[in-house]
Structure formats: C-alpha cells, structure tokens
Amino acid sequence: MPDNPNGRKLGFITHAVAFLAVVGLLAVINTLTRNELRWWAIVGLAWGIGVTAHFAVTFLPLTLKKQPLGPVDIIGISAGSIALLVAIFSIGIVGRMPAADASRRAESEARGERFSWGSELREENDQTVPGAFREIEIRTIAGSIDVSGGAAGGVEVHSVKTARSASDMDAIHVDIQTLGDRLVIQEKRDRIAARSGSIAYTVRIPAGLTSIVADSISGSIEVSDAGPGIDQNLHTVSGRIRSGLARDLRAETISGRIEFASEGKRVEAKTVSGSIEADIRAVAEGGSISMGTISGSVRLAAFAELDAELSLHSLSGSISCDFPVTASVQKNNTLEGRIGSGRIPVTVGTTSGSIAISRR
C-alpha cells in the first residue's frame, strides 16, 4: 500500500497521547493503593523508550530536511517532547527506589516492626474449597493470577502474600466466599493506608466450570490447561494476559500483551500498549471478533473455513491477509471486504503496528 506520511504522524500523536494518558492513570491508581509510585515508573520508562523511538523515526527527518512545520507537526513534536520528559522522569523515579526502601525501613524499625530491605516478607498458604462450582471469580490488586485445570474434589487455591513490613502483611488477607455454584476469591485490606502488599494466586480448578473471571490491577493473568467450554473474562491494568483455550473470551489490559486461543461465539481483546496474538479455532453462528490496540501489532491465525466480513484499519502499519478477500475498500492501511459470504464480523484496529491474518 502507498506511504501515508500524515497517517504516520497521526499514528504517532495517538500513540503519544495514549502513553501519557495511561502513565497518568497508572500513577493515580498507584497513589491510591499507596504503593509509592513504583511500577508506574517502570511502565513509563519501558514504554517511553518505544514512544521516543517512534517519535524519532516519524519526525526526525523533518528536522534534518528543514521542512516547514504544519499544525500536525507542531502537535506531534510537542507530544513527543512531553513523552520524552516523562521517560526521563521515570528514570529518576526508578533510580531512587533503593533510597525509598531505606527510608521505609527506618520508619518500620522506629515502630518496632520487621522490614525487608531488598526483598519482601513472604507468606504462602494452601487451601482446598470443596464443591461443584460452575463459576469462579478471582480478584487481586497488585498480584498475578494463574489458573489451570487438573484439580479433583474442589478448587485448590495457593496464595502468596508479600509486603515490605509486618503491619502491611497483617493488613491484607485472602477472602474466599461460596455463593451457590459461584466461588469468589479476592484480596481484602483492613486499612487503605497499607503502603505495600500484594497477593498472587495460583488456582487449580476441577472439570465442570463454565466461567472464569480474573481481575488484577497490577499483575499478569494466565489461564492454561483449564479444558474447553469455559467462558473467560480477563482484565488487568498493568500486565500480560494469556489464555490457552477459551470459549467466549473478553480480555482487556492497558499495558501488556494479549495471547489467546478461542473456539466460542464471541471474542473481544483490547490493549493500549501491547500486541495481540490470536488463534481462532472456531466461531459459532452469530458470533463476532473484535480486537484493538494502540501501540502494537495484531496477528490472527484462523481456521481454514473462516467466513468473515472484514474491517481492518491501521494508521501507521501494513495489513496482510492470507485468505482470498473480495475487497470493498483497500487503501491507506485499510482493508474492508469479505471472506466467503461474510458470516462473521471481524473488526481489527491498531494505531502503531501491523495487522496480519493467516490460516492455522
């Protein structure tokens, strides 16, 4: 497809604005959870390097060629400069982490508490919840969630609680509730002022479940070997999402990659900073596929009998499709058309990245 300079500039502007908005949101969430502005700075630094590189590739040629600047150029250069400053500021925050640890150690010792410097206090617990459950919900604030199959006679819950001080360890708990055929596993805090602490879950489930809900603010989520026929709703703010095989799937993250396989009716995968890699093994009648990212590519491998109405859009990346497509629109990083009779709507969008659809 022909080069589109304005599309590339708008793609970078969208990328930079998304970066600034996400880092700002993460900083606010981190402040509310009293986690000392730590992990937002790591995200800001890692993603900021990518934004800076995107900025240089898009706008540096303008400076070298001394071309006159239009409104779009001025907005792009301004956004890129702010993003660069945020990345530099993140370096300072990350560099001051050891000093912050020392300060908190002194505070804890003054209160007569244990404090872990350089590593966290850690407590592990195992619990089996008997019952024939159809649904399971797992929620945590700052920890990972790992769900797998293979349990017999109930749901096996392995939790790892970590914190920097004894008081923070005492302030967070694993709360398990049985609500009919629904099991809820979540993190509870006695006081909002706990300055650190997280709970990571490793959960083994028995056969017979039909729904998994996993929700984390700062942590990765993975579902593996759970068996077919399970709807999955997976959500995190800062972390990767991976699902080995889902029926219907909804996966959302702001800062992280999404990888999954599905064979249900509906698929919805969204991320802001990260790529998406999908393995579509089947789509039931009346289903739909929707995927989108701002900073990242989308790769979709589909079963050979895919019958789809395509709507693929990228501002600054290529689009390719291995299936024969009867195109209605094909220009400027856009491809719309049908594979077969167009039975299933497939909508994919990205701002800074490519889109590729291939056969499994």
Image: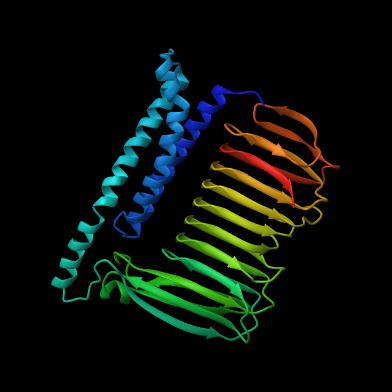
- Between 274 and 185, the residue placed more toward the observer is 274
Q: Residue furthest right?
A: 341
Colour mapping: rainbow
Provide residue 127's location: percent of width, then percent of height: 49, 84
Residue 215 higher or lower than 167, as above or below? above
Q: Residue furthest left?
A: 110
Residue 137 at x, y percent in the picture: 56, 70
**Residue at the (64%, 46%) spot, across then down:** 299
Measuring from the top left, give residue 310's x and y in whole percent: 74, 40
- The residue sitting at 64% across, 71% down in the picture is 226
46 versus 139 height, above or below:
above
Q: Nearer the viewer, residue 279 or 341?
A: 279
Name the side, left or right, on which 104 lies relative to 137.
Answer: left
Residue 178, located in which quarter of the rendered image?
bottom right
Considering the image in quadrants, where does the N terminus appear?
Answer: top right
- Percent across and percent down for residue 143 are 43, 66
Q: Quadrant of residue 67?
A: top left
Above or below, 214 relative to 93: below
Residue at point 47%, 27% (across, down): 58
Indicate left or right for 278 with 77 as reference: right
Query: Seen in the image, is 5 located left or right of residue 89?
Result: right
